[in-house]
Amino acid sequence: MVLAANRKALAAWGTRTILLAVGLVYIFPLYWMVVTSLKSIAETAVFPPTWLPGRWMFENFADVWRTGPFERYFLNSVLVSAGIVLMELTVAVPASYVLAKKSFSGSRAIFALILSGMMIPMQVVVIPVYLLLSKLGWINTYAALIVPFLSSSTAVFWLTESFRQVPNELVEAAKIDRAPEWRIVWNVMLPAVKPTLVTIALLIYIAHWNDLFWVLVMTNNENIQTLTAGIVKLKDADGLQWNLLMAGNVILVAPILLLYMAADKQIKSAFTHGGLK
């Protein structure tokens, strides 16, 4: 009995040690980015490297902000990411509801077609989409950054799976009360899958907040470009200064971390009880 208890305690300690080691591996790049962002340019080249700044250079962040129109980059990132989240959910919610709760011929084929869309990388369609947007005169506009992401196969798939877990009795009860379809979706379905909905919205927001490829392809105007394009330009401004480049990356990452912490409870609930398994 005592031997079994000792083995169980040893296994628990082993698990904690492995988890701690894995956690440190993931956290270390973030720690090094923050520490480097607070060093002087001379200290970033010191060998062996210092674990903490000799002098805390908080002015590095102000220097980054002055190298370009970062207010504009930041506002563009917020507008583009939030616009894409709003549009994708506006399309995905009714589509997922129909696929999950309505029976009609061809529904399986449509769902399979949507799943196949998840396997097509963006780079495959970039040339035809660019030519189309160019003919429409949308290059260097917010439309070029937002409209191509009107729908998301991934969002439709996750929401469909989550809606399927909502008991049909709830939908039937709402129909008996003569609730219209939009009210069933708004008052019954969406509250039931709130953790999944928040998680999908956050993942979409993060993906497009960090997107650089599409921004560089569709824009060359600073008034339209987003924060990621501004960070890339730090590499070319007065040579490569690692402290400023890392400060720029902290500015890029900080809003995402704050959003993640704000939605942490909903995300954990989605992965443990929802459809994101």
Image (cartoon, grey):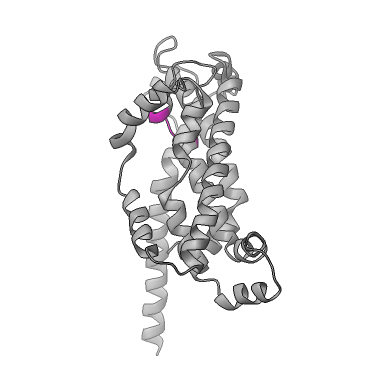
Considering only vertical position in the picture, is 172 above or below 216? below
Instruction: Where is residue 84? Give x, y as percent.
Output: 53, 39
Q: Does the magenta stretch include residue 100?
A: no
Who's the residue at 65% across and 77% down the image? 173
Instruction: Where is residue 188? Give x, y as percent.
Output: 64, 66
Who's the residue at 53% across and 59% down the image? 196
Considering only vertical position in the picture, is 178 above or below 208? below
Q: What stretch is highlighted in magenta?
A: 209-214
Q: Nearer the viewer, residue 221 or 95?
A: 95
Q: Nearer the viewer, residue 54 or 270?
A: 270
Q: Which residue lies furthest to the front in this view?
A: 105
Who's the residue at 52% across and 21% down the image? 224
Instruction: Where is residue 98? Give x, y as percent.
Output: 50, 62
Q: Residue furthest left?
A: 124
Quarter holding residue 135 = top left
Q: Residue furthest bottom?
A: 1
Is residue 275 among the parts visible in the rendering? no
Q: Is residue 211 magenta?
A: yes
Is residue 229 among the parts visible in the rendering? yes
Instruction: Give the position of the N terminus as an image quadrant.
Output: bottom left
Quarter holding residue 68 = top right
Quarter holding residue 207 = top left
Q: Which residue lies furthest to the right in this view?
A: 177
